[in-house]
Image (cartoon, rainbow, N blue to C red):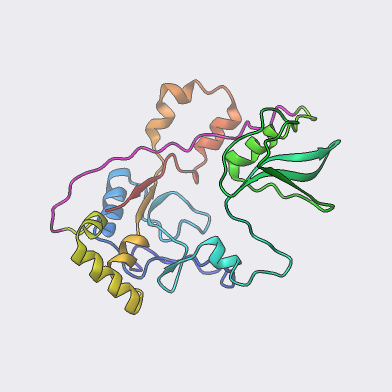
Amino acid sequence: MEKYAKPTKGAHGTSGPIGVSYGAEWMPLIDTFVEAGNDALNCGILLDYNDGNVVGASVAQFNITGGQRITSPEAFLKKIPSNLTVWTEVEVLRLLLDGKKAVGVEYLKNGKKGIPQTQNQSHDFTETIKTKGEIIVSCGSIGSPSLLLRSGITTKINPAIGQNLTDHLILSLEFELNSQILSHHQILEDPDLASAAEKAYRLGKNGDLVKFGGSSGVLFPKLPAVFKSKEFKEIKDAETKAFLMDPGRPTTEIWFMV
């Protein structure tokens, strides 16, 4: 395993609530994928892509501790503070403003759908909550700007807002393998394999569920052809070109799953 994956000493914390590790058992062909990726792209084998050096062929790291995936609720909400209340089935529609200050939120609850027709017109099933403190907007790169737009927050003209938002494009390629090479599809479709995988996980946090749920191969190559392309040559901004050409910045990301 150390041939393909070995954390860099001093580059990682050890006491945080989110576990980061390699799967204890790997699904088939990961080593083949890493070797083939290095041979085809000449990008080198990268033992730890989270130590600051990204370019290379590597084994993916997952949020796993003790054979179990770690989610945000499991990490941060096992012991809920007395001053924290968590609501589910709630959708925030807009922030409520007092001048330029956000003083509350308007929201839908219980999964009911609908959006106010105007900023000042609400449906009967929306509710509001006010605060004397602060409001933290944490809805992700898409949800946060959407919420701000619905809230009418346009008091400051700043052309830079939204300029760094780009699509994360993905292209999926699927190939049929030799039937003797086990894949996660076989486990899902075969009751006997699924039962055996579930039993192995219950008894010892191992087996096929661990392999396919916590391991993958990943390539972060630098592709010279990109810098010879028509599209790259048409980029006018020198800073953008320098950013893309940085030796430590990969051109693309390729994931491998069976």
Considering depth in this image, is 153 or 15 the residue closer to the camera? 153
Q: Does residue 27 appear to the left or right of 130 in the view shown?
A: left
157 on left or right of 41: right
x, y percentage for residue 21? 45, 66
Residue 132 visible: yes
Determine the residue located farthest toward the bottom in the rendered image: 203
Taking the image as shown, residue 155 lies to the left or right of residue 238, namely right
Residue 235: x and y, percent? Answer: 53, 23
Please state which of residues 114 and 234 is positioned toward the viewer in this rendering.
114
Question: Residue, x 13% and y 58% (percent of image)?
Answer: 180
Quadrant hosting residue 123: top right
Q: Nearer the viewer, residue 217 or 4?
A: 217
Q: Quadrant of the N terminus?
A: bottom left
x%, y% of residue 149?
A: 68, 32
Q: How many marks?
A: 0
Asked whether residue 174 is drawn in magenta, I would say yes
Q: Is residue 11 visible?
A: no
Q: Residue at x 69, y 30 (%)?
A: 160
User: Would residue 153 be found to the left or right of residue 18 on screen?
Assistant: right
**Which segment is the magenta one?**
158-180
Q: Position of residue 102 (x, y in %)?
A: 80, 42
Q: Kindly indicate the quadrant of the structure image that contains residue 141.
A: top right
| On screen, residue 213 above or below 138 | below
Residue at the extreme front of the image, as rendered: 124
Give the residue displayed 73% in from the left and 31% down from the top.
121
The correct choice, above or below, for 37 with respect to 9 in the image is: above
The magenta stretch spans residue 159: yes
Assign the magenta stretch its main secondary structure.
loop
